Image (cartoon, helix red, strand yellow):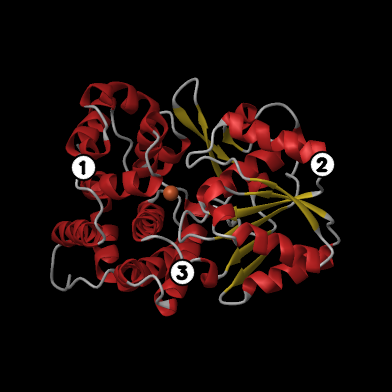
Amino acid sequence: MTATAFYIPSVNLMGSGSLQQAAADIQSRGWRKALIVTDAPLVATGMVGKVAELLSEHDVTSVVFDEVKPNPNVANVEAGLAVLQQYDCDFVISLGGGSPHDCAKGIALVAANGGSIKDYEGVDQSAKPQLPLVAINTTAGTASEMTRFCIITDDERHVKMAIVDKHTTPVLSVNDPDLMVGMPKALTAATGMDALTHAIEAYVSTAATPITDACALQAVRLISANLRTAVEDGNNKTAREAMAYAEFLAGMAFNNASLGYVHAMAHQLGGFYDLPHGVCNAILLPHVQSFNARAADARLGEVGAAMGCDVQGLSADEAAKVCIEAIRTLAADVNIPAGVAELGADEKDIPVLAENAMKDACGLTNPIQPSFDEVCDIFRAAF
Ligand SMILES: [Fe+2]
């Protein structure tokens, strides 16, 4: 076995009341002025004001940058960086889901390393750690609050750049389910299916280790048992807390075992048509795993068992099929669209989507490296 590294923020606050604890932690570190990176809807709910007030009670001032778009782009990073420099902020807080966290990582990385965020596409391209980042999560989730993955759209090329860099790891992550109860049903479903995709892609990854396996399977168990309830009854704190733990565990898995072709392909759909990341993943997940089954059928059978399916006595091939069917059922139960055509994708774009998917760093650890024609076939099946 080759040497492996395990990346995770050094402190991770979980559970009800962890936002309060985060404010005290920030104060104890001596940081004085935060750039809060967030989006306009969270300002409208009053959550951003609440966090700014909590910080000021702990002698920390803050400036808000609320222009983050659902798929943050290069211009978003540049605009946020300008605000950070104008106000001379000494650390960054991201508040929201994956989009604010990714945009904040881009800002903090360029603040410390200079140049453009485009210079850091790929794996470990930066020389220095980013400005300290505290990531306060409100979805469950992308797990961006605790990973070294930063996805920024390059509008000129219509692609999502995958920046996988140990220097983008936040120093402190906060998962307080009290901040998640207000999440709408569709966002709960999409982000929950994103977390399931992280767990499954990490479990069948060629870079999986016993540590990432344990995290991935427990994430699958928690998501299978709690996502439907979290979608149906957003105020159910038990389900919300279980999903917060699940998305974090799935993050621990994929932050270290990486991902596969579901993400490599979903990034292209998201970047090309500006579509929600979790929905693209949820639609592609069964199709990519059907393709992967010839190399990963035993592992997919184990995922099926973690999802609660009875796979006793089945062959590996049959158990993988049961698992894929269970993924489809869960996606349908939380009202994920059946195909990407419903989202406005166009079949004539498949060749360019496939070409870009094959360049995405997330595909490197897929259990099988597909040919261009095979990627096109998977996209076609997902329409
Ligand atoms: Fe994801």
The residue under label 3 is 181
Q: Nearer the viewer, mark 2 or mark 1?
A: 2
Residue 228 in sight: yes
Q: Amino acid at mark 1?
A: Gly
Q: CA distance from mark 2 to mark 1?
A: 45 Å
In the displayed structure, does residue 161 sit left or right of residue 234?
A: right
Q: Which residue matches tag 2?
A: 87
Contact between marks 3 and 2 (CB within 8 A): the answer is: no
Residue 270 lies left or right of residue 59; in this view the side is left
Q: Are marks 2 and 1 in contact (CB under 8 Å)?
A: no
CB of mark 3 near ligand 1 (< 8 Å): no
Tell us which disc is closer to us: 1 or 3: 3
Q: Position of residue 308 (x, y in %)?
A: 24, 73
Residue at 23% from the left image edge and 55% from the top image edge: 297
The quadrant in which residue 124 appears is top right
| Element class at badge 2 | helix
Q: Is mark 1 within 8 Å of ligand 1?
A: no
Three-letter amino acid code at disc 3?
Val
Instruction: Answer above or below: position of 165 versus 185.
Output: above
Q: How many other residues sit within 10 Å of disc 3, few (<14), some (14-19) or many (≥20)?
A: many
User: Does residue 4 sit above or below 221 in this rendering?
Assistant: above
Q: Quadrant of the C terminus?
A: top left
Q: Is residue 354 left or right of residue 157?
A: left
Residue 224: quadrant of the picture: bottom left
| Tag 1 near tag 3, CB within 8 Å | no
Q: How many numbered marks, from 0 up?
A: 3
Label number found at residue 339: 1
Mark earlier in primary sequence (1, 3) = 3
Residue at 68%, 38% (x, y): give it.
80
Q: Residues within 10 Å of mark 2 (few under 14, many from 20)?
A: few
**Where residue 179 appears, x then y in whole percent?**
54, 67
